Structure formats: C-alpha cells, structure tokens
Amino acid sequence: MNKELFKNKLVLVTGGAGFIGSHLVDKALELGAEKVVCYDNLIGTNNSLHNVVHLKNDPRFKFIKGDIKDYSEIKQCVEEGDIIFNEAASKLVVSLKDPNIDIQTNVVGNFNIAEILRKSESNARVIHASTGSVFGSNDKPFEETDPMNPSTVYGISKLAAEKYFLLYHRLYGIKATVLRYFHVFGPRQDFTGEAGVVGIFLSRALKGLPPQVCGTGEAIRCFTLVDDVVDANLILYKNNSSIGQDYNVASRNRVSVLQLANTVINRYGPKGMKPEFVAPRLGENLKPIPSTKKIENLGFKESVTFDEGLERTKQWIAEQIKNKG
C-alpha cells in the first residue's frame, strides 16, 4: 500500500471511535494523512475513547464529539473533508429496541451528509458503509444488482441511506461509493453487548460460560476480519471507477452460527461445555450471503484465514478481560 496515499488530505471518519471506524483512523494516519478527524457521539462505544486513546498525542489526530443527526454539528467537518469514511450508524439491536433512533441516525443522519455535500459542491470522496441486511435472505449469493428485500427496520434504514448517496451522485455529482459489510469481526469489537457474535462467543467461552446460540444456529455467516474491510475501503478510494457504484465485501468463508459456537468451545472453552440455545432473533436472515466478484475485480482479496482471525480476536479479548475484568 502506498504510504502516501492520503498525503496532504484531510480525512473525516464518522463513527471514528467505533470498531471499524477506529481501524480506518489508524490506517489513514499510517498512510500519510495531513489530518484525521474522528467524529463520534460515543453512544455505541461504551461512552469511551478507548479505541483511539493511543492517538491522543498525535498532532494530526483530532477527536470531535458530535452526532450526524445534527446538521449544524457535522456541516463544517463534511465541508472541510477531502475523504470521508462514513461509518456512523445505529446497530441492528438498537433498531429492535427503538426503531426511531435507528431511523434518525441511519436515514436522517446520512441524508444530512449527502445534503451538505450537495449544497457545498464538495469534491470529497465518500465511502459510505452499508450492510448486507439490505438484501434479506436467499439461497444463492446476492449480486449487487439483485432485488433488495430487507427483513428488519435496520435493513430498511440502511437501504434508504445508500439509495440517497447513489441518487445524489447521479443527480448532483457527489463522489459517493457504497460498501456493504457482512459479519465483520476482530480486535476492538464490543464483546459485552448483543452484536458481534464472534467476540461474544469468545468472551463467554474464556469466562467459562457457554456460547448462546439464537434459534437452531443454522444461520450462515461469512465472517470477515476488520483488516480486510479496511483494505476494501482503500481499494474503492484508489479506484475512481468505484464512484457512483455499490459493492459487497465479505470473506469467501461460510460458517453456521452453531459451527462457530462449537469451534470456539473446542478451542477455547472448558472440557464438556455445550452451546446453550436461546430464542431466535426477530427478523434474522438465515442466508445473507453475498457475491463479491465485483470488488474482487478491483483487487480485493481476504488477507488471512478465518482461523487466524479468530485467534487474533481471542488474544485481544483475553487481554481485555485480564486488564478490565
């Protein structure tokens, strides 16, 4: 990777203190950005800057506490940015508990960014993070051109956001690209909540507790290491042909949730542990599996095996448990 990819550039990462966003912040600094603005409301990050605390003495790093739902708050940051990695989002589990928060963040907040870019006639590149939840479930891998039938409020709100960005490209010329994530995992992902099944299973096993499998555990996942998701963002930024386009990004590995639970138990759990089965999650997609040919044609390739990624994540979680209890 070109170590001066972001030379003389101001990089804005919304949701920059979060799991994926903080890795993008690190990478932007590593690749020579003149300034990186980490914009985050800290609501989804346990109200902490722990993911970016190691950057506090870097003069090129700036943290701003703010919310994309507030047009006036985000306006200057968007107008000044040369590159925007738009990671701010409300999560699936939030949408199940409070759909209004989900809509305000994923629809209104993202519309704010698109509208600011339109009004300012900004020349910034925007890589907008979307999700495989926009598709629903299917027996064959989803192509980018396939019909989208989300089965959750979260999926609908994320679909609306990506439609706004792509429409604003066609109508007003904003330089937006949509990148859909599928089942991202790795260091810095919160393992104490209800999202991020790899980390949650690992943390429970390391504490001597059985992984809790929703439903039958037959749901298929293509767990993708966060490093690969970061690389995918960079590939799209480097290729101007990606402007106005949408892409799926995911590992080619396919694992059921029950297989994951058993793998984690066999490697890291105490002898005799068995998965614990709980009620299925409302609206869960059993086979949200993508085709990734489109982004692979631009050079994307997963960097490590799932087994290696699982071990890296386990080591990070074990360290967090040791340090924080």
Image (spheres, rainbow, N blue to C red):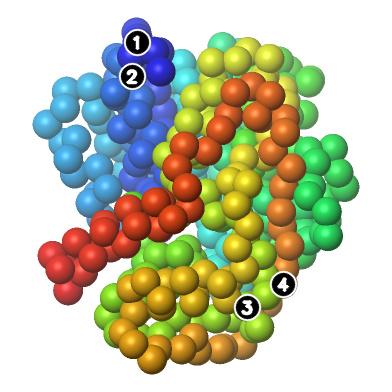
Q: Residue 180: which quarter of the image?
A: top right
In the image, residue 22 sits, relative to residue 203, either above or below, namely: above
Mark nearer the N terminus (4 vs 1): 1
CA separation in Å, label 1 and label 3: 45 Å
What residue appears at the point 40 percent right and 18 percent down from the top-left corner?
1
Residue 167: x %, y % from top left: 77, 29
Kindly identify which residue carries mark 3.
217
Classed neighbour count for the residue bearing mark 3: other residues with Cα under 10 Å, few (<14), some (14–19), many (≥20): some
Q: What residue type is disc 3 on?
A: Gly
Distance Cα–Cα, label 4 vs label 1: 44 Å
Tag 1: amino acid = Glu
Q: Nearer the viewer, residue 306 or 294?
A: 306
| x and y percentages locating residue 198 in the rendered image | 45, 64
Q: Which residue is found at the position 72% from the left and 30% from the top?
A: 294
To which residue does mark 1 refer?
4
Q: Residues within 10 Å of mark 4 (few under 14, many from 20)?
A: few
Secondary structure under the numbered disc 3 in the rendered image: loop
- Of circles 1 and 3, the one toward us is 3
Mark 2 residue type: Leu
Q: How far apart are marks 3 and 2 (CA)?
A: 40 Å
Q: Report which residue position mark 4 lands on.
A: 283
Residue 22 seen in render: yes
